Amino acid sequence: MRSRDDRDRAAFDEFVAARSGSLLRTAWLLTGDHHLAEDLVQHALMQVARHWERISTSPEAYARRTMHHQHISLWRKRRFSDTTLSGYDAAQPAADSDLRLSVTEALARLTPKQRAVLVLRYFEDLTEVQAAAVLGVSVGTVKSSTRQALGRLHVLAPELAEVVGVES
Amino acid sequence: MSRLHDALEELSHDAPRPTPHPDLWHRGRRLRRRDRVVSAGLVLVMVLLVGGLATLVTGPPALVGPAGEVVPEGAVPRQIEDVPDHVTEPTDADLAVGPVSVAFVSGNDLPVVVGATDGRYRVLDLPGWQDDSVLAVSPSGERLAWLSATGRQTLDPALSVLTTATGQVQTTRLVLGAGLRPSAASWSPDGTRIAWLGDLAGSRGSGGGAVFGVVEVADTLTETPATPSQRGLVGVAVAEDGSLALGTQSGGLLLDADTRDPRLLPRTDGFPGHFSPSGDVLALETRVPAQESSTVQVATGKQWRHAFPADTFDASTSTPVGWLDDRLQLLLVTSEEDLASELVVTTPEVDGTSTWRRGIGTVDPVAASSLTVAVDLLPDPDGSSTQALTHDFGEPDWPMSDETRLGLLVGGGVLLAALLLTAYVLRRRTRRLI
């Protein structure tokens, strides 16, 4: 007969095998960097293991919240030391007509918070209220950040107008 | 907007293949165990802090005394300290304190005793105690006597004796004590008599009158008629047979136990301290700093001197504290230079079998000025220089001053608030994530 710890370990392994790919895609969208994305996921999974007894009924939601918090936390720590996005509001010519490359470059020129809002709202399909809860900010902040992010995408990559829409 | 979703979805497939670290589970569990230890520690600190603060705010003042070991047979402490200035009230109303090893009057004029078995300091609430009362513990430590004038104009000064085992107090009013100012109280070696001495008002020291007497201590107190004297008297001692010794500026007076006929001792360099148990030798108090102690042979009046060994004391005063037996006495030697006081065991004279041993104990200068010691608690010397004659009970654990208590209260409050804030923030963060 397996112990409680063995059962938890098996359930955790099952969760990791099933969902780490999805988590890594979100992390990749958040960071745009393979190594940072892997770090984010590893950290989130370790926190899941840490609090497994309490979150075993919805480990993925906890993992995603942890990733977003960790991402913003890392961004806040680096915000004064990293090179700022100088001139990021200037329109950049699309280096490639490929839509994927345009989106990649445009996302890279958003602030981490703006990227997080876009990923939550348009990749994970969360409502404004849910996104606000995940990020620990007000709904108004989510709204304004979404508007700013879409507006910046519109400016940075005019060829994405059809993708982004005109609501910015 | 679904096209943005599709674009992000397509872009997400550029993510690398997941390679979760195989040790993730164990790392998480280690963090979990650490969390539990930290949480338990935090809870323990908060409980202790809250409990400590509650005790500080609502609890009675801590008892005075070291938290040292218990010595069932009783012992004299190796270090004798004065009471801190902020202790201005008695700490013990219950006078059944058990045997005491030391008694003295604090710098705040309060009666202080040290427990013989536990080394605990107690400031006692003695009935009739006055600022200028004198205090003396019996050689056995089982009785405590104090001489009080109950008011400058009153006619009834009193001598009281406390039985430390029961807390019973006996008091006798002293006749011929009008305007008495207590000067000295001294026990006989067997603890059956107390000689007392008082100056008449305005005549402390020399040049005025004095009154002295003896009280026998048993189940009741029996006072022999007090004797007035036109001389100024300094120091009094009583032998087991009731003989008295009194000091004057011109020499010592010996009074026969039965007839009270006075016999003048030749001029001696000191005043009466304590008779030896046999009554053959009288230890002398030297108030002029010297490098020797003095005793006098009662029968012949011959004075013996015991010079301090070389490189021990500079010029010092010597105060007899009592006798361990007929050969060895306990002295309190106080350096004139730094006023440091030390207990010394010595023989009356220097010969082939003489003893002189310092380092028995140290005494605070304030406590030294009125120190009496239950000398029967000192063990019989075995002749070795390594035998411990006193016991190290540790530092006295004085009650905190109001300032210290307030400081701890404020500091503890700030710390508690910080801990609560930390716990709140941590809990809030955890809840936000889950």
Image: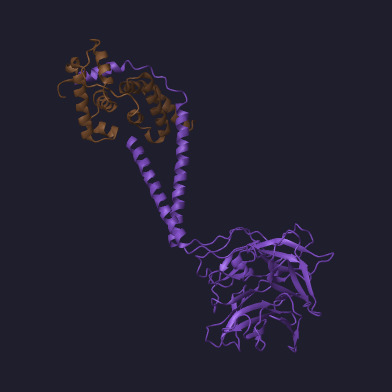
Chain colours: A brown, B purple
Residue B235, x across and y down, in percent: 67, 78
Residue B286, x across and y down, in percent: 70, 72
- Give whichever of A18, A157 is nearer the camera: A157
Looking at the image, residue B100 sits to the left or right of residue A126; the answer is right
Identify the image quadrant of residue B273: bottom right
- Give whichever of B339, B193 is nearer the camera: B339
Give the residue furthest to the top.
Answer: A97
Give the residue furthest to the left.
Answer: A166
Question: Is residue B111 shown above or below A131?
Answer: below
Q: Is residue B170 visible?
A: no
Identify the image quadrant of residue B185: bottom right
Looking at the image, residue A159 sits to the left or right of residue A38; the answer is left
Q: Residue at x 41, y 33 (%)?
A: A52
The quadrant in which the C terminus of chain A is found is: top left
Give the residue furthest to the right.
Answer: B352
Q: Residue at x 78, y 59 (%)?
A: B384
Question: Is residue B106 shown above or below B245?
Answer: above
- Give whichever of A137, B332 is nearer the camera: B332
Question: Is residue B237 shown above or below B369?
Answer: below
Looking at the image, residue B177 sits to the left or right of residue A112; the answer is right
Residue B302, x across and y down, in percent: 80, 77
- Give whichever of A116, B231 is nearer the camera: B231
Q: Is residue A133 visible?
A: yes
Q: Residue at x 61, y 83 (%)?
A: B199
Residue B341, x across and y down, in percent: 65, 64
Identify the image quadrant of residue B288: bottom right
Q: Residue at x 81, y 66 (%)?
A: B350
Number of labels in the image equals 0
